[in-house]
Every structure is written in structure tokens, then in C-alpha cells.
Image (cartoon, rainbow, N blue to C red):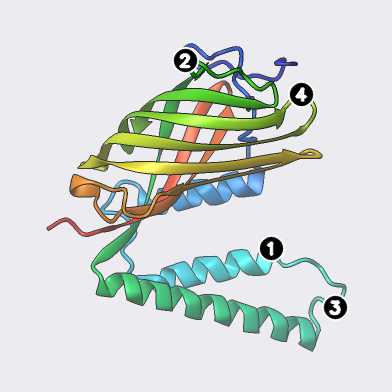
């Protein structure tokens, strides 16, 4: 298996790590959007759901920029289409914000770095299948989320061939912006013909202690040999 594109971690990384470079660096537009979002949410009490108008304004502007050029830009049809879709997005944001406000939840964002160690696992009495893999995961997490995590990853296919997939369960224990507890992340990833998709979500009901009822989605990326995470989440207000 070719590991020439692997990015080294601060902790020991197994030579059998099956997903080198899975989290590709974002495009300049995605990076700018992420930095803008982090700037709005970091350094305060987060982004309260009682301010959906700000979310709507930012989302509408970004949506209009993202719409493809259909060749009728500036026409009545194009203007109507952009306006209608933008209004629908705004209405959905207000509905989500209203529901969260009724439950006392706050939408927030956490970011930081992590060190990871992945080691192949074997099960006594079972013969290893070359088409399947089983790995243990250990992380040390820094930033808005401080803590450690352990988990298990199941893999299939071959990264070297360009077609593979993995699923994983990862239990995180630590402090999220001052609130201590634990929760479980579920990973699901596929790779095919150069396309890579990774989805990481909080398992419903897995939050404990001050992180009870936590919900959210995490993304990861690798830049300059460092692993970064961004975590958008909702959590009931602290009593």
C-alpha cells in the first residue's frame, strides 16, 4: 500500500492507517467562510439562536454567491429564482432557531486541533480477512474541546486502489467550552474514483453530565501536518 501522501501526526501514527489525507484542505472560499464563522462565534457565549436574522443575512449572501451562472443572470427569472430560494432558506433558519429557543438550546461552534494514533486490532481465534480491517483509535484533543477519545474503526477496500470505506465509533471525554462530560461520535466515510465523503455526527442520547442532550456535526482537515477539527453543535443552556 502506498503511503507517500500520509501526513505525520504529533503522536505515533500506525503505518497501517487506512485513510491518509482523507480530510482534504478546504478551498479558499470554504476556508474564508469557516474563519468568518469562527470569528463570529469565538470569544463570547456562542451564537445564540435568538439572532436568526444575522444567520439569514449571512446565509442569503453566501447562497447568492454560490448559485451557478445559468446564462440568464440579471434577468427577471434569475432574480426571482434567487430571491425565492433565499426566502425559503431564511424561513427554515427562523423555524430551527425558534424551536431551539423554546428548548433553551444554544447553537455554538468549537474548533481546535488533535493528535491521533491508529493501531490495527486482532481478535483471538479469528483469521484476518485481507478485505476487512479493524483499528483502534486514540486521540488527544485541544482547543475549545479539551480531552481524549478512544474508539474502534472498521475498514473495507483499499485506499491504494482508490475505492474504500470505513465506519467508526469514538467516545470523547473532556470539556467543551467549560462544560464537562462525554459523548460518542459516529464516523462514516467512502472513497471512490477520487471522490471522498466523510460524515461525523454525535450519536443521539450519548451525551453525559454537562453535555447531556448534545447534538452536532464535526468536520476534520489536515493542514501543514496538523489535524484540525470544527464542531457545530447545539446544547441546552447551563442551569
- Side of 123 relative to 146 (left or right): right
Q: Quadrant of the C terminus?
A: bottom left
Q: Give coordinates of residue 9: x percent, y percent.
A: 51, 17
- Up the image or down, 205 lies above or below 98; here it is above
Gap in angstroms between the C-alphas marked 1 and 3 = 15 Å
Please state which of residues 126 and 55 is positioned toward the viewer in this rendering.
126
Query: Which numbered marker is on residue 66?
Result: 1
Residue 21 in which image quadrant: top right
Give me the residue at 78% from left, 38% from top. Answer: 194
Q: Residues within 10 Å of mark 3 (few under 14, many from 20)?
A: few
In the picture of the structure, the residue carrying the numbered disc 4 is 160
Disc ID at residue 159: none
User: Quick check: 13 left or right of 213?
Assistant: right
Identify the residue shown where x is 28% and y is 34%: 173
Which residue in the structure is indicated by mark 2?
10
Q: Nearer the viewer, mark 4 or mark 1?
A: 4
Say which residue label 3 marks.
72
Mark 4, secondary structure of its residue: loop
Which one is in front in this view, the residue at disc 1 or the one at disc 2?
Answer: 2
Residue found farthest to the front: 125
Quick check: 47 left or right of 32? left
Dot 4 and dot 1 residues touching (CB under 8 Å): no
Q: Quadrant of residue 145?
A: top left
Measured from the top left, where is residue 128 in percent x and y?
61, 19
Q: Nearer the viewer's eye, disc 4 or disc 3?
A: 4
Amino acid at each position: 500500500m502506498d503511503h507517500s501522501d500520509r501526513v505525520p501526526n504529533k503522536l505515533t501514527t500506525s503505518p497501517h492507517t487506512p485513510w491518509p489525507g482523507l480530510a482534504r484542505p478546504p478551498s479558499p472560499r470554504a476556508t474564508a467562510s469557516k474563519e468568518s464563522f469562527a470569528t463570529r462565534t469565538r470569544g463570547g457565549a456562542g451564537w445564540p439562536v435568538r439572532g436568526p436574522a444575522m444567520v439569514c443575512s449571512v446565509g442569503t449572501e453566501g447562497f447568492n454567491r454560490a448559485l451557478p451562472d445559468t446564462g440568464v443572470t440579471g434577468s427577471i427569472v434569475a432574480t426571482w429564482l434567487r430571491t425565492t430560494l433565499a426566502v425559503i432558506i431564511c424561513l427554515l433558519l427562523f423555524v430551527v432557531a425558534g424551536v431551539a429557543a423554546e428548548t433553551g438550546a444554544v447553537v455554538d461552534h468549537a474548533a481546535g486541533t488533535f493528535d491521533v494514533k491508529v493501531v490495527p486490532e486482532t481478535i483471538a481465534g479469528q483469521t484476518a480477512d485481507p478485505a476487512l480491517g479493524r483499528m483502534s483509535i486514540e486521540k488527544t484533543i485541544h482547543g475549545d474541546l479539551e480531552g481524549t477519545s478512544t474508539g474502534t474503526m472498521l475498514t473495507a477496500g483499499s485506499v491504494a486502489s482508490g475505492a474504500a470505506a470505513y465506519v467508526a465509533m469514538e467516545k470523547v471525554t473532556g470539556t467543551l467550552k467549560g462544560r464537562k462530560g462525554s459523548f460518542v461520535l459516529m464516523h462514516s466515510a467512502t472513497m471512490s474514483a477520487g471522490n471522498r465523503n466523510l460524515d461525523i455526527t454525535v450519536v443521539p442520547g450519548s451525551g453525559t453530565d454537562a453535555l447531556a442532550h448534545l447534538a452536532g456535526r464535526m468536520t476534520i482537515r489536515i493542514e501543514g501536518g496538523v489535524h484540525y477539527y470544527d464542531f457545530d453543535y447545539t446544547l441546552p443552556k447551563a442551569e
